[in-house]
Image (cartoon, rainbow, N blue to C red):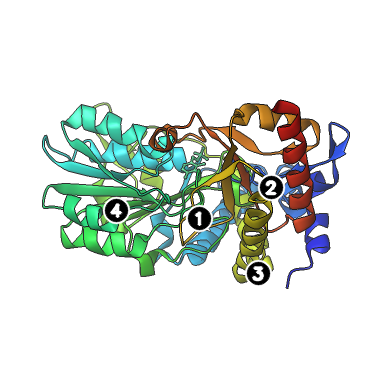
Amino acid sequence: MLDINKIRADFPILSKKVNGKPLVYFDNGATSQKPQVVIDAISKYYQEINANIHRGVHTLSQLATDAYEASRGKIQNHINAKFAHEVLFTSGTTHGINLVTNGFASILKPGDEVLVSALEHHSNIVPWQMLCEKTGAILRVIPMNQEGELIMSEYDKLLSDKTKVVTVNHISNALGTVNPIKYMIDEAHKFGAAVLIDGAQAVPHLKPDVQELDCDFYAFSGHKMCGPTGTGILYGKEAWLNKLPPYQGGGEMIKEVTFEKTTYAELPHKFEAGTPNIAGGIVLGTAVDYMNEIGFENIQNQELELLRYGTQRLLEIEGLKIFGTAKEKTSVISFNIEGIHPYDIGTIIDKLGIAVRTGHHCAQPIMNFFCIPGTIRASFAFYNTKEEIDVMVEAVKKAQLMLS
Ligand SMILES: *Cc1c(COP(=O)(O)O)cnc(C)c1O
């Protein structure tokens, strides 16, 4: 079992007061808090080894380059990628997905199909729509049921020789559904389609194994897994990354430049134009180390217990409805209270120090499916406690009394 008090002491922000009340931070789905080791590693980088990477022969540049590449290696191990050059540093999930959709612009033909799930975040919908507009490819949607689970029999029917790409999140940010991605990847591959997994909500809770999954791309953000903002990873299979054209042109991504013709650098540099977020990339490795030290099994046990307890406590509230009741679910509870706008509840409980997200959670199609404007979303991390859930439940009851 985790020593929660010891873990909480790693996160300075958790002992802060907000609006005069102890902070209860349940907006982990939007971004996680950062442990002291991560905060310290950022200043250590700037204090001790700051230099541009891959360019200078001087000592600091070498130290910074080594640290950056060591971090890439750590992340390669963490997700079990076959090669380090399959691990691209990005600014986040959104950047990773756009890198892929940009590349597919030169591959897709009119009439080709892209399958996207009904459970996606806007950042895994809009880039594909833009790609389809550009290429004449057709976007098709894998539907979900009332529990917020994708319907696999419908998915099977949508797959055909026309399917070129399937894109789906590992875990839904709005409902917490864990999707059967292994099955979906295997079925897509029978038709030769590439599969992109949006892992933004998965990496805070589990350790993905990209070789076992056999996905073609796996995108995630650092800031949702205890790392700095503006960091992320796009894993891509070597063969795909060699096939896709570069995303951005600039320094670092070239082999040779003349005004007549430029040749591109080898992987991973082909996709890493310009000076990257060097400190962020290095410190993402620190965050990965921190989470592995805590252990993903411990993290999951704690979070599933919070999910169970939170669900049970919230359902005590009259008129409260939970959206997203999938059998496979992570520690996200999206709910509404009859007759009350989610925003009003969020505003009142914020005054009591509780941070939840209200709104459509960048997933308007899901809200449209349930015919609601939005939900209140409490998303728990391993450093949250049952006592905090009790505080939230009391606050929601208070808000309900005030508003009805
Ligand atoms: C947060 C999130 C994104 C976008 O991540 P950014 O860090 O904003 O680029 C994409 N998909 C899902 C499922 C998310 O939760």
* Quadrant for the C terminus in the image: top right
Residue 61's spot in the image, x, y percent? 60, 46
Residue 158: horizontal and vertical position, in percent? Answer: 18, 50
Q: CA distance from mark 2 to mark 4?
A: 38 Å
C-alpha separation, residue under disc 4 versus residue under disc 3:
30 Å
Q: In the image, which disc is placed on residue 144?
A: none
Q: Earlier in the sequence, mark 4 or mark 1?
A: 4
x, y percent for residue 186 = 26, 64
Q: Residue at x 64, y 55 (%)?
A: 287
Tag 3: residue type?
A: Asn
Visible residue check, residue 381: no
Measured as percent of width and height from the top left, residue 379 is found at 62, 48
Query: Is the C-beta of the residue carrying label 3 under 8 Å from the nearest atom of ligand 1?
Result: no
Callout 4 secondary element:
strand
Residue furthest out toward the right? 20
- Of mark 1 and mark 2, the one earlier in the sequence is 2
Residue 195 has which mark?
A: 4
Q: Which is nearer the N-term, disc 4 or disc 3?
A: 4
Image marks 4 and 1: residues in contact by CB distance under 8 Å = no
Q: Which residue is mark 3?
A: 298
Q: Secondary structure at mark 1?
A: loop
| Residue at the spot of label 2 | 49
User: For this rendering, which residue is in front, 172 or 52?
Assistant: 172
Disc 2 to disc 4: CB gap under 8 Å: no
Label 1, residues with CA under 10 Å away: few <14, some 14-19, many ≥20: many
The nearer-to-camera label among 4 and 3 is: 3
Task: Residue at 66%, 27% (x, y): give it.
Answer: 344
Q: Residue at x 60, y 33 (%)?
A: 358
Residue type for callout 2: Ile
The residue beneath circle 1 is 202
| Mark 2 secondary-structure assignment | loop
